[in-house]
Image: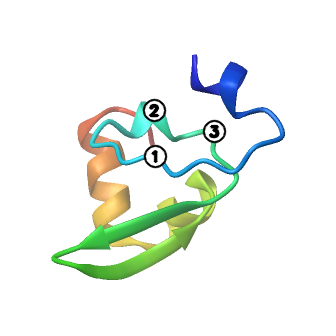
Amino acid sequence: AIDAVAKNRTMIVIAHRLSTVVDSDQIIVIDQGKVIGAGTHKQLLKSTPLYRELAGTQMLS
């Protein structure tokens, strides 16, 4: 659903479900008010332990 409206647009999406943003060009991970990671889903799985943990919990790894 987001893909259809996001085409050729910049969108800021706040989500707890990673499936909402998994195909985004850029995902920013914020924990306790601080940016702890940024990149694509694949990049964040490698570089950001919290994102990897959330993806595993939500079965997106």
Which residue is drawn at the image coordinates 84% and 40% (left, top)?
Answer: 8
The tag earlier along the polypeptide, 3 or 1, is: 1
The tag earlier along the polypeptide, 2 or 1, is: 1
Amino acid type, mark 3: Asp
Q: How many marks?
A: 3
Residue carrying label 1: 13
How is this picture coloured?
rainbow
Per the image, label 3 sits on a secondary structure element best described as loop
The N terminus, quarter of image: top right
| Residue 24 can be seen, yes or no | yes
Per the image, label 1 sits on a secondary structure element best described as loop
Amino acid type, mark 1: Val
Classify 10 Å Cα crowding around label 1: few (below 14), some (14-19), many (20 and above). few
Q: Residue furthest right?
A: 8
**Residue 20 marker:** 2
Amino acid type, mark 2: Thr
**Residue 23 marker:** 3
Per the image, label 2 sits on a secondary structure element best described as helix
